Amino acid sequence: MQTPVIPPADKALSEVESLRQQVEALTAENEHLKLLVAKYRCLHFGQKAETQEQLGQLDLGLAYEPPSIVVTEAVKPSFAANDGSVEKHSRKRKPFPETLPRETVTHAPTANCCPECGGHFKALGEDVSEVLEYVPASFKVVRHVRPKLACARCDHIAQADAPSRPIPRGIAGPALLAHVLVGKFCDHLPLYRQSAIYARSGLNLDRALLAEWVGHCHELLSPLTETIRRYVLGGAKVHADDTPLPVLSPGKGRTKTARLWTYVRDDRPSGSEDPPAVWFAYSEDRKGHHPRDHLKSFKGVLQADAYAGFNALYETGDIQEAACWAHVRRKFVDIYRANGSPIAAEAIARIATLYGIEAQIRGQLPAERRTVRQAEARPRLHELRDWLETQNQRISRKSGIADAIGYALNQWSALMRYTTDGCIDIDNNAAERALRSVALGRKNFLFGGSDVGGERAASMYCLIGSAKLNGIDPEAYLRTVLSRIAEHPINRIDELLPWNIYPAQAASLQKTA
């Protein structure tokens, strides 16, 4: 049988089509590599104000954009955390707080009379300037003296009860313990550094002793942590997120990747007067049963990312899923920084309009927020979806922009939920803000010593984070709690919550939130 002869024209067209497919594949691969490089630079060098020319150094000459892509206008997006707008302010020194103690030093002229004519001086006014000084922290020893009194008649001996201590027979007072805890879990000072600082004052407080103190405080404060857990999960909406925590793996000579989970109750954006709070939980891994165990008693709206471990929670209907527009926006920002994609620029600009609407209704009541969202945000969201679907049909399926668009479209129902409920926020930034302390601490600690250490960290982050959310100094809060909790009735543990100990500070923050 004779082999059919392929016309030269058809053969040329076939080769052109093959080359076109190769170009598309190489283009998608190039975009993906540039995106990875940009993420690497961001992770290792921080969020620098890199210009597009600087990012252009990553360009390998393979960039290709299909001619059918439609962008409404050339937009240079900004990369603020919320609405994409950054406003620069001129540096202006604020006055020193009135609560600071002041010391006045008067500098009088050395001469008692005028050096020119010998006449007497008279008061003309004065110039005043202030300089901020630092008074080094100091230790003191508190001696508790309990006199013994004996009755002259019957030899009865009377003596006051010994004051309670946070740690039985321990040498550390509440203020010192609070300072150690805040130093480690708020100011991110590892215990060995704190030990070195104390040594400069002549005190030998080694790391093992400080770690023992942290353990005792964890046990002592555990009822309060449990109370915050019940309070957080007792709300109608919870923000959830997690972050890795390297922990030493005994016997293996290396670390394992554990997780710290955060759950935040903060309804201030919807005008609620309920105090905000955060609860942390530790787990040895990131398996999906951990959040299911944490939230087994919760019913309401769960605002989180697209982690698959949460999916089982939505099957019963007791928990509704609300997605995060900040996650969607971040994917487009990464792509724009990598290759300046006009599609990414347009997506960022459209999402910025949604955040602009949110800025106008922040702090208003849920009904008002829902009305505005239905009237202004919902039409823009429908337009955004139509635009994303159109672009998705015109770009390579292997490109990074396709992944970003696919993520948004797959989560669309959950992304739209905030428009139907005024209590729901547009994003999950409340949980991400709660994890910042963990991320900063991780850079200093590098890893946790054990699973027990991870559980202690979760407890301390819970108490310190809840105090900070209510505008309360965490060291002052822990100092007060540690001085009371040993003798405080367990059935009245609610009295030791941050907003109950310092109601004035919490109320003040509530008004300004």
Image (cartoon, rainbow, N blue to C red):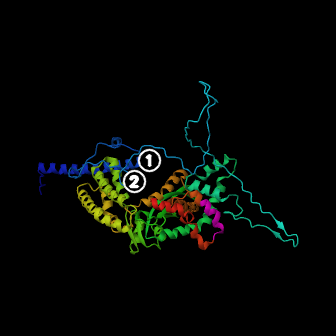
Q: Please rate how many residues cluster around mark 2, counting C-alpha atoms within 10 Å: few if below 14, some from 14 to 19, many from 20.
A: few
Q: Quadrant of the C terminus?
A: bottom left
User: Is 366 part of what is drawn in magenta?
Assistant: no
Nearer to me, 437 or 39: 437
Q: Is residue 388 left or right of residue 147?
A: left
Residue 259 visible in the picture:
no
Give the residue at x 51% y 61%.
Answer: 470
Nearer to me, 34 or 120: 120
**Which residue is denoted by mark 1 in the rendering?**
46
Q: Secondary structure at mark 2?
A: loop
Q: Is residue 218 left or right of residue 442?
A: right
Q: Please rate how many residues cluster around mark 1, counting C-alpha atoms within 10 Å: few if below 14, some from 14 to 19, many from 20.
A: few
Given the image, on which type of amino acid does mark 2 rest?
Ala
Distance, label 2 to label 1, CA atoms, is 15 Å
Given the image, on which type of amino acid does mark 1 rest?
Gly
Q: Provide the residue span drawn in magenta.
A: 478-488
Q: Is residue 292 left or right of residue 152?
A: left
Magenta stretch prevailing secondary structure = helix
Q: Are marks 2 and 1 in contact (CB under 8 Å)?
A: no
Q: Earlier in the sequence, mark 2 or mark 1?
A: 1
Q: Is residue 373 left or right of residue 116?
A: left
**Which residue is denoted by mark 2 in the rendering?**
81
Residue 228 point in image, percent of width and height: 53, 67
Q: Quadrant of the N terminus?
A: bottom left
User: Is 487 part of what is drawn in magenta?
Assistant: yes
Residue 339 point in image, percent of width and height: 31, 47
